[in-house]
Image (spheres, rainbow, N blue to C red):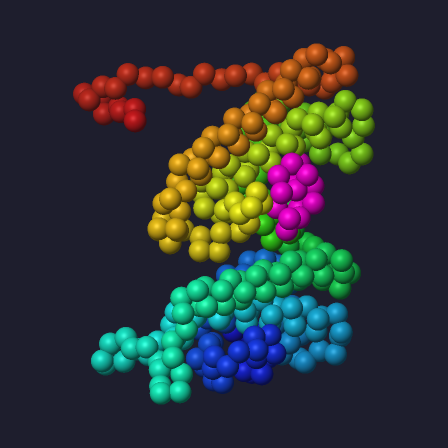
Amino acid sequence: MKLISKIEEVQAHVPVNMTSDIDTIKPFLSNIERLFIKDLIGKDQYEALIAAYAEETEDDQINEAILICQKIMANLAYHQGMPVLAVSIGTSGIQVISNLETKQAFQWQVEDLKQALQELGFSAIEELLQFLEENPDKFPDYINSPQFIKQESLLIQSAAEFSESFDINSSRFTFQKLTYLMNRLELQVIKKLFGDGFIEALKVDDQEGKYQTLLDEYIKPGLVLLTVAKGIIERIISIENGSAIINFKGTYNNLKESMAPNREQISAMYEQLEKDGNKFLQDGLEFITANLADFENFVPPVTRRRFKFTNDATKGVFGV
């Protein structure tokens, strides 16, 4: 925990009387700082903010970035720590903290509070990423971070552009979490269909004519839908009210109870997204074929047959 040192900095963002002791919430603050702040903005920018905080910088923009980081940490730390903070663990086991003047909150009140804390934390994440992007001269370490450079190297480079084909509320956070899936799909699907050199040429700015049509109407929508399908299956995102949002709980084991009633719907959604995504890409290939004169640099990729062999126990060769 290096961007918050006083309980007052926590209470400035979470106006609830959960604790007045920084040590009580410290493990959760440290965890959120590591899992979110450092991962979001990159190691170099993260360390630059730590140094500025330690030196008590007077730079208004850097202090604003630190303040937003504290907002993320405070809200998501309480969200993460609530189950532990609500009980007492001792030699007698686990006990609910209570007295004659207070009583335990109803479950719906607890869930509403957790939802509010999560939304406040995620809103602050969006605020931080936007603030850093809008001030590149002040935060060059973020602009040069692997996180930012990776999304700049993809066919789809912004949350707003992604949202044109599937709604993610133009969330930079959701987009950043999906970039590694998009990169994987570019390598495993897009480049194999269209050719490595052809796809790299498409990434040049200011495409015109049929090249722009191919990108906007076929390749990008196909890539987006396949990415969302992968994101659902790998539990990175969930769909609420038709929009993709980050799956805060993350793992299947944490989600299986709440997802059980919707398992068939999720499977059907995945299959439909994958089908539609592949249809866009196949239509893109047909668009190229129908307009070959306009795509002189397109070279149909050579399909390589997989190596086949026969299992032979005597030779120690097995195919699985």
Q: Nearer the viewer, residue 45 or 179?
A: 179
Magenta-colored span: 153-171
**Magenta stretch encompasses residue 261:** no
Residue 154 falls in image quadrant: top right
Let me know if residue 126 appears in the view: yes
Q: Nearer the viewer, residue 151 or 216?
A: 216
Which residue reaches farthest left? Answer: 314
Quarter of the picture containing the C terminus is: top left
Q: Position of residue 8 (x, y in %)?
A: 58, 83
Q: Position of residue 227 (x, y in %)?
A: 55, 37
Q: Nearer the viewer, residue 159 or 257?
A: 257
Which residue reaches farthest bottom? Answer: 100
**Magenta stretch encompasses residue 157:** yes
Side of 198 relative to 33 (left or right): right
Q: Position of residue 175 (x, y in %)?
A: 61, 47
Q: Nearer the viewer, residue 35 or 221?
A: 221
Q: Is residue 165 above or below residue 291?
A: below
Q: Is residue 283 above or below residue 133?
A: above
Residue 71 falls in image quadrant: bottom right
Residue at (39, 40) in percent of width and height = 263
Let me know if residue 183 appears in the view: no
Q: Is residue 52 above or below residue 234?
A: below
Residue at (53, 78) in percent of width and height = 16
Residue at (40, 47) in percent of width and height = 259
Q: Main secondary structure of the magenta part?
A: loop
Side of 83 relative to 311 (left or right): right
Residue 157 falls in image quadrant: top right
Side of 84 relative to 158 (left or right): left
